[in-house]
């Protein structure tokens, strides 16, 4: 094996041969020059330093200065050969310390993709050679490694996992992701970027770490940042009551909707808007610091730190609707018709209408069965059971 390539193993994990790029070696030299006396440049399993007594000489490098088998008096050429034998570890250091660089959400996210904080370099490089897949919302992110230790990423919809790149619309500019998230598969505007309505049929292939991060952030804005804050224990959560207290203008009416035993109205809002079927975030906000909601917050990988604009807008509408005084309406339904009304409401609420076939009249929300119910129960002006609604006042919106 030449000095320019390395293949090692960790337990039963065979690591692919990795060349030591000149950029990585130059970065090591720069890092060594920047060290204070008695400091070491640490890698996984070994370290490198400069001999203080020979810091101006040609043979000034020390390999494993803190180990029992320290190699001293190494020239730059000797150091290159030694590091080339350990190319996977050196390139791993180079990727995270120099290519990605700063500590923060991006670095943490890229490390999370390959479990860099939990697995050895050998284990990770063996897995990267095959391709490591991670789920992020509706995305599948695949990380691979080149023969120079560089990371390359494929970002696509989970529905397209395993589909050849040539069968998908391929993009390479992270800014293109902004257009992909605007409309769903039916061409309808997506007001909530974390709704599970991301259309498929596209791929961002062969991206570097920074571009892969930008694609993910463009598709799911701020999700990585909030995920990172949560991991660091710094997630700032703004609960319902505080969020609604700062609403003004047309949204100020929500502040009046703060009544009911156990704040069940907020439970209804959370159940309607914050279920996994409606939003991929995991709700972390509650009613207030001292009062939790009764509704599960979901299982999403990224947290929701406050009621979003969709929730606020919907709550404004419900505030007005719930301010109406209840009335009693009387009309007759057969037991099957009552069950059918319940089926229709469930199907609309769960977004299953398009899944119900026209020929399947056993389904309560079947279109023909629903039209039959309307023909039977509605009068000529659209009143159920012929009973007029007669609201107390007109909707002022």
Image (tube, grey):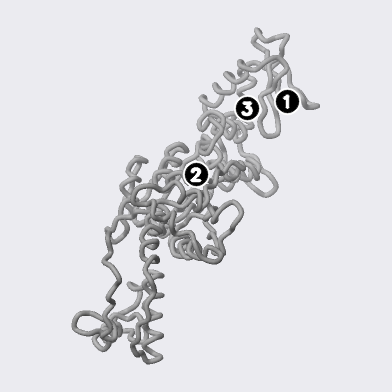
Q: Picture coordinates of residue 72 (x, y %)?
A: 73, 18
Distance of label 3 from label 2 (alpha carbons)? 34 Å
Indicate the secondary structure of the residue bearing disc 1. Answer: loop
* Relative to 334, residue 138 above or below: above
Quadrant of the rendering where the C terminus is positioned: bottom left
Of discs 3 and 2, which sits in the foreground?
Answer: 2
Indicate the secondary structure of the residue bearing disc 2. Answer: helix
Residue 269 in view (yes/no): yes
- Closer to the N terminus: mark 3 or mark 1? 1
Q: Picture coordinates of residue 213 (x, y %)?
A: 45, 41
**Considering depth in this image, is 366 or 385 the residue closer to the camera?**
385
- Tell me the tag on residue 224: 2
* Relative to 50, residue 350 above or below: below
**Can you name the residue that lies furthest to the left here?**
380
**Considering depth in this image, is 287 or 64 the residue closer to the camera?**
287
* Relative to 201, residue 46 above or below: above
Task: Name the residue located 46 percent from the left edge and 52 percent from the top edge.
Answer: 307
Distance of label 2 from label 1 (alpha carbons)? 37 Å
Q: Callout 2: 10 Å neighbours few (<14), some, many (20+)?
A: many
User: Residue tagged by mark 3?
Assistant: 83
* Relative to 272, residue 78 above or below: above
User: Residue tagged by mark 1?
Assistant: 64
**Can you name the residue that lies furthest to the right here?**
68
Q: Are marks 3 and 2 in contact (CB under 8 Å)?
A: no
Q: Give the side of residue 60 with respect to residue 210, left or right.
A: right
- Closer to the N terminus: mark 2 or mark 1? 1
Q: Picture coordinates of residue 227 (x, y %)?
A: 54, 46
Q: Picture coordinates of residue 268 (x, y %)?
A: 47, 65
Q: Callout 3: 10 Å neighbours few (<14), some, many (20+)?
A: many
Image quarter of residue 46: top right
Image quarter of residue 25: top right
């Amino acid at each position: 094996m030449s000095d320019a390539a390395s293949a090692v193993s960790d337990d039963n994990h065979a690591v692919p041969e990795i060349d030591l790029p000149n950029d990585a070696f130059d970065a090591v030299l720069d890092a060594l020059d920047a060290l204070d006396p008695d400091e070491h440049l640490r890698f996984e399993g070994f370290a490198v330093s400069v001999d203080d007594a020979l810091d101006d000489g040609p043979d000034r490098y020390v390999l494993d200065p803190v180990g029992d088998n320290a190699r001293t008096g190494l020239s730059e050429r000797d150091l290159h050969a030694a590091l080339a034998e350990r190319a996977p570890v050196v390139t791993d250091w180079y990727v995270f310390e120099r290519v990605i660089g700063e500590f923060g959400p991006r670095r943490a996210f890229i490390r999370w993709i390959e479990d860099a904080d939990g697995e050895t370099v050998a284990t990770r490089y063996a897995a990267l050679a095959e391709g490591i897949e991670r789920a992020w919302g509706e995305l599948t992110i695949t990380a691979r490694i080149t023969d120079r230790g560089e990371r390359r990423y494929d970002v696509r919809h989970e529905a397209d996992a395993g589909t050849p790149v040539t069968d998908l619309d391929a993009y390479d500019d992270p800014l293109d992701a902004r257009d992909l998230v605007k409309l769903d598969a039916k061409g309808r505007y997506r007001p909530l970027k974390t709704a599970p309505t991301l259309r498929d049929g596209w791929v961002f292939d062969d991206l570097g770490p920074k571009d892969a991060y930008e694609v993910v952030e463009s598709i799911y804005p701020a999700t990585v940042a909030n995920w990172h804050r949560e991991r660091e224990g710094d997630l700032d959560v703004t609960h319902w009551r505080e969020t609604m207290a700062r609403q003004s203008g047309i949204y100020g009416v929500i502040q009046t909707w703060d009544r009911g035993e156990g704040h069940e109205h907020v439970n209804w809002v959370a159940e309607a808007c914050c279920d996994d079927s409606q939003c991929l975030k995991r709700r972390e906000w509650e009613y207030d610091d001292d009062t939790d909601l009764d509704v599960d917050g979901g299982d999403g990988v990224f947290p929701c730190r406050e009621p979003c604009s969709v929730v606020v807008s919907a709550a404004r509408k419900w505030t007005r609707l719930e301010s109406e005084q209840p009335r009693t309406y009387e009309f007759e339904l057969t037991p099957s018709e009552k069950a059918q009304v319940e089926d229709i409401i469930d199907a609309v609420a769960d977004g299953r209408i398009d899944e119900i076939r026209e020929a399947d009249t056993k389904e309560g929300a079947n279109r023909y069965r629903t039209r039959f119910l309307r023909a039977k129960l509605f009068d000529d002006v659209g009143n159920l059971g012929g009973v007029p609604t007669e609201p107390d006042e007109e909707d002022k919106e």
